[in-house]
Amino acid sequence: MKDSFKQYFIELLGYEEASAFFLAIEEKKVKRTIRVNTLKSTKKLMKKYLSEKGYEVTDSPFSRDSLDIKGTGEKWSLKLPYHAGFTYPQDSSSGFVVDLLDPKPGEKVIDMTAAPGGKSTHIAQRMQNKGVLFANDMDTRRLKALHSNLERLGIWNTVVLRMNAHKLTLIYPEYFDRVLLDPSCSGEGLFNTYEARTEFWSLKAIKAYSQDQFSLLCSAFRLLKPGGRLVYSTCTLNAIEDDGVIEKLLKKFPQAEIIKEIPKQIPQQIQSLKGIRFWPHKSNTKGFFCIAIGKKESLGLSRKLDCLRTLKSASKKGRMIEKELFKLYGLNDFPWEWVERDSFLFAVSSEMIHTEFPMKHSLSFPIYKDGRLTHAAALWAGLHTKKCIHVDDLLKFFQNSKIGKKGYLKYELIKHSNFPLGIAKNEEGKLIPLQIKMF
Ligand SMILES: C[S@@+](CC[C@H](N)C(=O)[O-])C[C@H]1O[C@@H](n2cnc3c(N)ncnc32)[C@H](O)[C@@H]1O
């Protein structure tokens, strides 16, 4: 372990506490945790299923939607719910961030640095696919992962933006009920996982990160409505990127205040520091920091950029597709508005229809193209109809090879036990899976 890293944390925590922290880094005993996507399943059902498959499953003490898992289970038993969008592998310290943000259905929420979407998908599930979530990031590769996660988890209240987050303040000053800022950081909280090492740690890098974080936090505060809630989180533990950045914000903006009432399930704290920290040696999780900030008064900001557009509803086309989907699969509840874009029909929340978006944006949930459901929509549809073909040979399905089952429709919905797997094309009675990219 790097000496300068050790020295910094001994000064911050004292010798005994720091030694326990260093031991946790060396032992690498992080709990295995998944978050249940409550848009598609429930914690109770997932707990029952995974226990029956051989795992030891308990409610995570730190996040409302998370389950801690131990042991090993039957083949495919963790992959299936992941593939169907019922679960998301996520440490409960990250899950806690959305407990603290506490987004509600119908609100306007922004995740300023969202990719690959661990927290955005969690926010959307808490919003019950209602209201509008803006998921922004500027990294194209990571945005692809974000899109894939939004589709798999069945999320249609989200617009995806690829912008430098600072620019958003010109368009949406004091607009959002909730703002999440989870920026890039030095990642000390990951040092107790297998992939991360302390060798690359340096005070110089930490100071550079903290400058970016502070300027992003100022932008986050500008995006927040008076009376709204801003959560700042990092997967690092030093006081420069965490407490230091918050102290600078409070000094710059007298309108900012720390929100003290927080969810009950926090781990044991080290009192000398601000915010909530998950210390690996105290919580057996990855290390994490988060804090909630409120806004007492407006900053009096106004919009500086006006080239925005609203979505055009394609309700007429949507009704035709609805009729067809009823005829084919017996689907009869479509809890969204339809929008047409690049020959795809997308689902969006009704609040999104009345919202102005930057000219360049993308939607999260494609439903229909070229006379058939998309993979994302097939995962959703399989939950709401009995008209599915059940397959046993999962390997064949995931290898995209012919399934030994007879099809009747041109495109059949495929399921294994209670898990929708996607859609397959019927070629002379033989079913061939389409668009399976998960394995
Ligand atoms: C810690 S990761 C976010 C993880 C994400 N919140 C999740 O839970 O899956 C930080 C992200 O911030 C993005 N980022 C950093 N600076 C940014 C900026 N100025 N504008 C937009 N995104 C930025 C990076 O591309 C990176 O994807």
Image (spheres, rainbow, N blue to C red):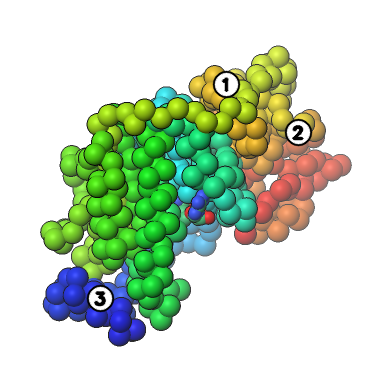
Displayed quadrant of residue 244: bottom left
Quarter occupied by the N terminus? bottom left
Displayed quadrant of residue 270: bottom left
The residue lying toward the viewer, choosing from 320 and 395, is 320
Q: Is residue 224 left or right of residue 12?
A: right
* Alpha carbons under labels 2 and 3: distance apart: 53 Å
Q: In this view, does 348 lie to the left or right of 51?
A: right
Residue behind mark 2: 342
Q: Residue at left 33%, top 44%?
A: 231
Find residue 353 and name its label: 1
Quarter occupied by the C terminus? bottom right
Residue 410 percent across, percent down from the top left: 79, 34
Identify the element where label 2 is drawn.
loop
Identify the element where label 1 is drawn.
helix
Q: Residue at left 76%, top 56%?
A: 401
Amino acid on which disc 2 is placed? Asp
Q: Can residue 3 be seen in this view?
A: yes
Amino acid on which disc 1 is placed? Ile
Residue 79 percent across, percent down from the top left: 53, 56
* Alpha carbons under labels 1 and 3: distance apart: 51 Å
Q: Which of marks 1 and 3 is nearer the N terminus?
A: 3
Residue 128 percent across, percent down from the top left: 43, 31
Ligand 1 under 8 Å from disc 2 Cβ = no
Q: Which of marks 2 and 1 is nearer the N terminus?
A: 2
> Which marked residue is nearer to the observer: mark 1 or mark 3?
3
Residue behind mark 3: 8
* Alpha carbons under labels 2 and 1: distance apart: 17 Å
Q: Do the residues labelled 2 and 3 touch (CB within 8 Å)?
A: no
The residue lying toward the viewer, choosing from 104 and 248, is 248
Count neighbours of disc 3 (C-alpha within 10 A) and say few if under 14, some if 14 to 19, many if 20 or more.
some
